[in-house]
Amino acid sequence: MLPEDRIREVEAANKEASERFNPMRIPRTLEEALGNRTVLVTGGTGSIGREIVSQVLRYKPRVVRVLSRNEYNQYAMRRELGDRGDLRYLIGDVRDRDRLMRACEGVDVVFHASALKHVAICEYNPFEAVKTNVLGTQNLVEAALNYNMELLVGISTDKAVSPTNTMGATKLLAERMILSASQYKGDRRTRFGVIRFGNVLASRGSAIPMFIEQIRQGGPVTITHPQMRRFFMSIPQAVELALKASLSARSGEIFILKMPVMRIIDLVNALIRIYAPRFGHDPQAIGVNEIGLLPGEKLCEALMTPEEGLHATEFDDHFMVEPLSPPDPAKLKLENTGYDSESQELLDVDGIIELLEQRGLVEQFLTGMSS
Ligand SMILES: NC(=O)c1ccc[n+]([C@@H]2O[C@H](COP(=O)([O-])OP(=O)(O)OC[C@H]3O[C@@H](n4cnc5c(N)ncnc54)[C@H](OP(=O)(O)O)[C@@H]3O)[C@@H](O)[C@H]2O)c1
C-alpha cells in the first residue's frame, strides 16, 4: 500500500499526463463550457445569432459580445433585452480583419453566425458572398488561432453539401476552413466544429412570411416547384444543437440534427388551411402559382453526403461526422446513403399543421409579420 503523499503524487502526475494528452480539456456541461467565458456571436442580431445570445446568457458567461454591421438592429435588440452588464454590442464587419482582431481580444468561445445566406442574392453578387462567407470566416479562424481561443463553432447549411450555387459553395469553403484549422493548429487548445442546419422555420427572410402574406391577400401563393422537399427545424431547436455541439466537439467534427422533411406544396397547403379562415378566405379559393426552380436551387437537399456518412456516428437526435481521416473499414461494409431530403419519410399536411401548432409557430409567424 502506498503512503497517502505518494498516492497524491501519482494522481497529480496522471492528471498532468492526461491533460498533456488532451490539452483541450473538453467541458462536460454547458455551465462549465460557457460559464464565466467571454463569448462572441458574429451575426448576433440575426434570427439564429439572437437565439444563440439568449441561450448562452442562461449559462452565466462573463460577457457576450454581439458583432454585426447594422446599428438599428443592435439598437432594437438592446431595447428588447434591456441594458445588461453581460451583453456588449460591437459594430463591425467580419470582412474587416483589424476590426475582427480587436473584437476577438479576450474571447474564449465564438459562435460564427454571420453570413450572406440567400441563394438568389449570392448568385447575383458572388464576389460579395465570397468576401463575407469565405474571407470573413478566414479572418475569424485566424483570430481564433491568434488568441488561442477555446472553441469556434461555425453555423452552416444544407446548401453547403454538394453545392450547386454560389452561396452553398462559399459556405462549403467556410466549413472546410474551420474544420481544417484543426489539422494545422499546432499545440493551440482551440476546438473547431461546424453545425449544419436545414431550413429554419420563422427565420428572417424565410419563404413562410411571404406565403402567409399572399394567403392574407387571398392568393395565389407563389412556389418554385411543388415537389421541392426541404428539411425544417425551429430556431430554438437549431440553437440547442449548436450549444450541445460545443460540448461534443473535440475538433474537426460536423454536427447535423435529425429533422422532419416536408414537400413545399404540403407546407403551403398546411399554411392555407391554418391561415385562410383567419383572414376571412375560403381555403379552397386560394390558388398556387408555380414559377419553376430558381438558378442554383435544388429539388432536394442533403445534410450529409454518403462519403461523410462513412465517418458519421448516429445519435438519437443527431449525427456527428468525424474528421475525414480514412474511414473505419467496418463502417465501409454498411450501406450508408448519407442524409438527404429525398430518401427521408415526408410529413404530410396534417403532420405539418400539428408540428407548427406544437412548436407555437402559428401565432409566432403572425407576430413576425406585424413587427
Ligand atoms: N435561416 C435559415 O433558414 C438558415 C438555414 C441554414 C443555415 N443558416 C445559417 O445560419 C446563419 C445565420 O442565419 P440567419 O438566418 O440568422 O441569418 P440573418 O437573420 O440574415 O442574420 C445574419 C446576421 O449576420 C450579420 N451579418 C451579415 N453580414 C455580416 C458581415 N459582413 N459582418 C458582420 N455581420 C454580418 C447580420 O447583421 P448585419 O446585417 O447588421 O451585419 C445578421 O446579424 C448563416 O450562416 C446561415 O447560413 C440559416
Image (cartoon, grey):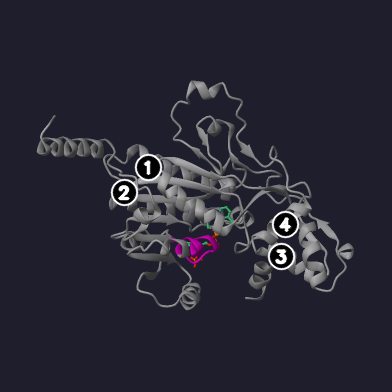
Q: Amino acid at mark 3?
A: Met
Categorize mark 3 by other alpha carbons within 10 Å: few (<14), some (14-19), many (20+): some
SS at circle 4: helix
Q: Does residue 217 appear in this view?
A: no
Q: Which quadrant holds residue 187?
A: top left
Q: Please identify, in this view, whether the residue under mark 2 or under mark 4 is nearer the observer.
A: 4
Find residue 145 and name its label: 2
Report which residue position mark 1 lands on. Answer: 181
Say if residue 61 shows up in the picture. Answer: yes
Does 343 appear above or below 135? above
Q: Earlier in the sequence, mark 2 or mark 1?
A: 2
Instruction: Name the residue tied to disc 4.
Output: 354
Sequence-first tag of 2 and 4? 2
* Residue found 74% across the figure and 66% down from its top: 212
- Direction from residue 333 to residue 37 in the image, left or right: left
Magenta run includes residue 52: yes
